[in-house]
Every structure is written in structure tokens, then in C-alpha cells.
Image (cartoon, helix red, strand yellow):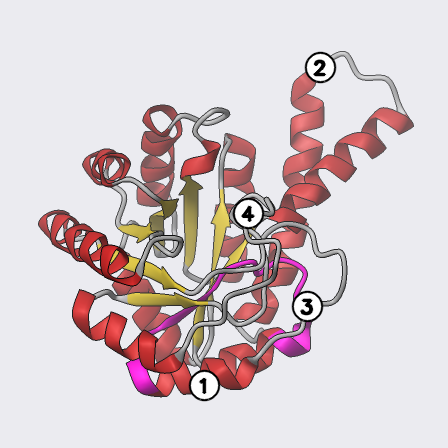
Amino acid sequence: MLINLKDILAIAEEKGCAVGAFNTPNLECINAVISAAEELNVPVIISHAELHEPVAPLSVIGPVMVLAAKNAKVPVCVHLDHCETLDYMAAALEIGFTGVMYDGSVLPYEENVENTKKAVAMSAIYGASVEAEIGQLASREGGGTENAGGPVYTDPDDAKRFSSETGIDALAPSFGTCHGIYKSKPVLDLERVGVIKEKTGLPLVMHGGSGVSPEDYRTAISKGIRKINYYSYMSREGVNAVKAALAKEHSDFFHDLAFAAEKAMKDDVLKAMKIFYGL
């Protein structure tokens, strides 16, 4: 069942939980995430990040994601994650994506506002919802180190102003998480999350959600996090499963390795979902 981002976050708001948003750059990831959601009977978000374009072109994977969402037995939002160009966003909306995240966090404040307002107007034509970001994580999407000096924490007053000026449906603040695999335990400013939630009234999004402790997940959700982006650790489990399969026995068929990866990723997604949804 394909629904938009605003509606799926409303479900999370009503239940006081967070919806998992999982990057799905290939069919195995799509199958792992949707089958896990169906097993637990929970809504889910499948995402495509612009940085995955070289390995999973939007024109190829996008229609597959939309079809999988329409055929799912649970509510599914098909979401564009960390989009930095409005042309790329337009292509995703034309394919049928129901949520988009415009990322202008590295831009000057006024330029971020201007582009985000354009994204909101564009998405409204398609009945899609918009997430945006203010502040910067300690690393950029994909685990890069463009902002290696550390996170630029979101100022709650700036978040309130940004939200009211742009008309977005969800806000991704920076409060200490980072993308990729954590090299040390993250130090999260969860009180900041609560203040931002109070000032904006919006569903909040945790980027860099992989690797956070169950306790911190639960606290973040109690403070207003309604969407948690999760991919790196799920993907790593797929890699580990392939390594284990190759070490255990010889295989001449790639599909055997792909199936082993899919099963391992599903198991990891199930664990994450149970925490996000309080199951």
C-alpha cells in the first residue's frame, strides 16, 4: 500500500513510535525490508539516496520501489533521501515517490530556505511530502568526512524559523549522530531533540540511525523522533552473510549469495523495527 510521508509519520505520531526508513539500492534490500515490515505488520519507508545513483540509477530502481510499495500488505512510503538538486527530485516525483528529503544543510540559511520552499511547492503538485535538514551531521551521507570537525548542532530557534518559513512536513535536526559505521559510541544531545520538537511541532527525523543503542533510540523517540534512517549496519550484515557463505562452502551461483545476504539483512531489520515500534 503506497502512502505519502506525511501520512506514514502521522501513524508514528499517533502511536508514539518511529517508522524505520531503510535505503534499498537493490532488490535484495527491498525484499528484506518489506518482508520484515509485513511479518511485523508495521508501516515502513523504503528510500533511495542520490549518492546511490552510480550503483542503482533512479530510473531503474525507482519504478521497482514504487511497484513493491503498491503490492505490499502494509503502508509503505517511497522516499528520496538526501537530494541536493531539484531536477533529481523532479525525476523521483515523476516516477511516483511519495516523500522527498531536500538536503540544503551545507548551504547558507537563506539559500536553504529558498530551495526548500521550491521543493515543497514542487512536491505538492504530486501529493508528496517534504523532509528537510538544518544543521549538519559529523559526516555526510555515505559516511564521508566532509564535516569531519564534528556535528553542527541544530539551534532550536533556527529550526522553528526554518519550519515556519518553508512549510515542510518533517525536520531532520543534527543532535550528535553521524552517517556510516560508528568508530566510537555517539554522544547524543537528546534534550535538544525535545526542545526542537516543542518549538516546531513537526515529526523529527534521526539521520545516521544505525549503531545507536536501544536505550538512546527509545529516549529519542520519546523526545519526538518519528523517522529513523537505517542502512549501514543492515548492509554490513548482508556482507557478513556472503563472507560466511563463501567460507562455509563453494558456490557457483550468485543468487545463493544474494539470498544469504537478503536473509541476514531481514533479520537485522527485524531487530531494528522491534525497537523503533516498541514491539
Does residue 265 belong to the magenta stretch? Answer: no
Task: Return the residue at label 3.
Answer: 186
Q: Answer whether residue 201 is visible to the viewer in this image.
A: no
| Disc number for residue 37 | none
Looking at the rendered structure, the kind of residue marked 2 is Phe
Mark nearer the viewer, 2 or 4: 4
The quarter of the rendered structure image containing the C terminus is bottom right
CB within 8 Å, label 2 to label 4:
no
Q: Answer whether residue 222 is visible to the viewer in this image.
A: yes
Which badge, 1 or 3, comes first in the chain's sequence? 3
Please identify the residue farthest to the left as the structure is shown: 125
Q: Position of residue 255 (x, y in %)?
A: 65, 21
Q: Is residue 67 above or below residue 138?
A: above
Q: Label 1, label 3: how many angstroms apart (C-alpha)?
A: 18 Å
Q: Identify the residue at image location x=28%, y=35%.
A: 88
Element at label 2: loop
| Callout count | 4
Element at label 1: helix
Relative to residue 81, is residue 176 drawn left or right?
Answer: right
Which badge, 2 or 4, comes first in the chain's sequence? 4
Task: Return the residue at label 1.
Answer: 194
Q: Label 2, label 4: how many angstroms apart (C-alpha)?
A: 39 Å
Element at label 3: loop
* Magenta part of the chain: 199-216
Q: Position of residue 29 (x, y in %)?
A: 54, 39
Q: Identify the residue at image location x=57%, y=79%.
A: 189
Which badge, 2 or 1, comes first in the chain's sequence? 1
Q: Position of residue 28 (x, y in %)?
A: 56, 34
Task: Return the residue at label 4.
Answer: 146
Q: Residues within 10 Å of mark 4 (few under 14, many from 20)?
A: few
